[in-house]
Amino acid sequence: MQEQKETTGYSVADNYRYAFRCLKEKEGVAAFAVLGGSTALGILLPFLEASMAAAVAACLISGREPGSILLLVGGYVLLLQAVRFLHNHLRETQGKLLTTFRIGMWEDFYRKCVEVDGSYIESAQGQRKTAQARENLFSGEGEGIGVYVEQFWTAITNVAGLAIYGIIVGRASLFLLLLLLGQVLLSETWQKALRKKTYARIKENARNRQHFFYLRRESIAIENGKDIRLYRMDRWLLRAFHEVVDRIVSLEYKTARGPLAANILEGLCTLAVNGIVYGYLILQMARGSVTLPAFLLYVGIVAGFGTWMRGLFLGLQQIVQSKAHMDRYREFMDLGTGEEDGTEQVRHPGMPHEIRLENVCFRYEGAQKDTIHDLSLTIPAGERLALVGLNGAGKTTLTKLLCGLYRPTSGKIYLDGQDMTSLSREEIFREYAVVFQDVFAFSFPLVENVSCVPEGQEDRARLEESLEKAGLAERVKELPRGWHTAMNKNLDPEGVALSGGQMQKLMLARALYKGSPIVILDEPTSALDPIAESGMYERYDEMISGRTGIFISHRLSSTRFCDRILYLEEGRIAEQGSHQELMDRQGAYAALFTLQAQYYQKGKEGEADA
């Protein structure tokens, strides 16, 4: 498995360039007009609101005629309402825009998930990276790329508003400006400490609740009832319940009490500062240094000064929090797809291919040894090859290497002499149809699960032929809407859930419908009863006629029809040959076959005795 390089150290500026580039691609240039307009009005509106009392007072003492005063005040109010309406409209539009932008990013994320090397995405590190990147898009409206973009404009709004208000207060008194700044900084220090402590308590209580829910689930589980009663576990469980509930209640009380104390302290501080500020302004007005309109303006500005400061601190905090999401998202999106995807095309598309492996090794992340080790193998075009062996021998891993889902840690795999690393993955995947042992159906109509195209675009004749060969045609006729019936009930309450054996046939039908020249079947009959399994093997030659077939099974009797059988042990080819050749050799294959035959024979005798 190739090493995936991790990138670190994205700067805030670099992240914003990336976010704005994505925003432009998804929403167009008009998105910046909406955000910019909302920002400009967000600066203007609070200033107009804070200045209203001063403007009215200035009109009243101006000596103008009452009608003129009424006209000016009415015009001011109309302007204020117009700005407020337009700002609210742009804010609403901005919210919708950022939501659609975040949703639009899902496609890029999901595309990356299927492009990244399969072995990496399945590894513990890959799963962790994927989950962390997903938070950037799926953490809701409170964090992630949408908030990251929004808080940039919010920061501009708060910085501009703070600058305007600071200039106005500073003109009155530099002492007042420093006093207000000190109050807000002190208040923010308290709030930051409180948020940190509250977050720690919430995190601790999350663990307590997880403990509580575990106890609740296990104490009422029917399968646990007999042990709980026989061993008198009820007393232990009740004691554990009491302990965890006491911890939860205690932390909830402390969490609720913290903001109250901080608010009281902040209120006293605000009262003291406002007393000094308003006392100073009243004194200045009494001396004639400040007019009534100016006094009212300063009062409004002072009242809004803290709002700008707190808004800036909160916005910066959200930017820092969302930056972590952005960094992890970009680390994932910047991952290579393993060795870079090739660009060459398959030489003989749609024709049976020869597959050749030269000294191929593959090791999973964190593993101490290779799962596939120094394996060399040639599979001629059109051959029926069986891969058998005990669990952990490397059979499924080998199939994923063969079809390009995994890349070798070392060694080469060739398709008709072409190095598979030189081929595009899309080209490779087109040549393979694989049925893995873990089968599932999407909650879409059966026809879409088989054809993998939107309903109505399928090839009807090919669909009917695939269902017939897979042995599922009769079951489909019994469904309420035939092959238009939805699978499962997740999206359609009238959907149908197929049995395990029917699901395997459905996946086989999908592989047959694809019509690829190489077919790989990984335990395709594990959920079938012996009669259905026997019928499947009898039709196997017909199903993959004219194709290269690779078949995996833990039931060795099912591989007898194959041209060649490979018996794997610890990622190596221990034995190979036809069934009869391997039986004559009396090696590991023959021993396992004989053991299985005895087991099945005893099973049949037991059924007869019963």
Image: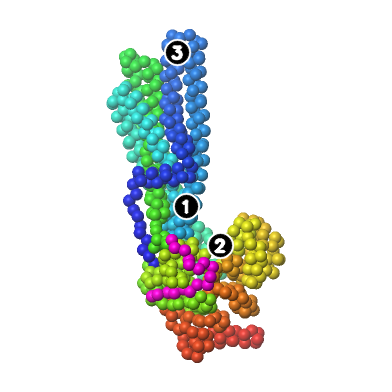
Pair 1/2: label in front? 1
Q: Position of residue 352 (x, y in %)?
A: 53, 72
Which residue is drawn at the image coordinates 45% and 84% (left, top)?
A: 575
**Which element carries disc 2, helix, strand or loop?**
helix
**Which element carries disc 3, helix, strand or loop?**
helix
Tell me which amino acid carries mark 3.
Leu
Tell me which amino acid carries mark 2.
Ile
Pair 2/3: label in front? 3
Q: Alpha-carbon neighbours of circle 1 within 10 Å: few (<14), some, or many (≥20)?
A: few
Q: Position of residue 9 (x, y in %)?
A: 32, 51
Measure the C-alpha gap from mark 3 to mark 1.
Answer: 60 Å
Task: Please tell me the numbered disc located at residue 220.
Answer: 2
Q: Which residue is mark 3?
A: 60
Which residue is drawn at the image coordinates 36% and 15% (left, top)?
A: 291
Residues in magenta? 343-359
Quadrant into which the N terminus falls: bottom left
Q: Is residue 574 visible?
A: yes
Query: What is the total number of numbered labels drawn onto the structure image?
Result: 3
107 is higher (above) or lower (below) than 154: below
Quarter of the view holding residue 532? bottom right
Asked if marks 1 and 2 touch (Cβ < 8 Å), the reply is no
Q: Alpha-carbon neighbours of circle 2 within 10 Å: few (<14), some, or many (≥20)?
A: few
Q: Main secondary structure of the magenta part?
A: loop
Quarter of the view holding residue 56? top left
**Which element carries disc 1, helix, strand or loop?**
helix
180 is higher (above) or lower (below) than 339: above
Q: Which residue is mark 1?
A: 108
411 is higher (above) or lower (below) than 594: above
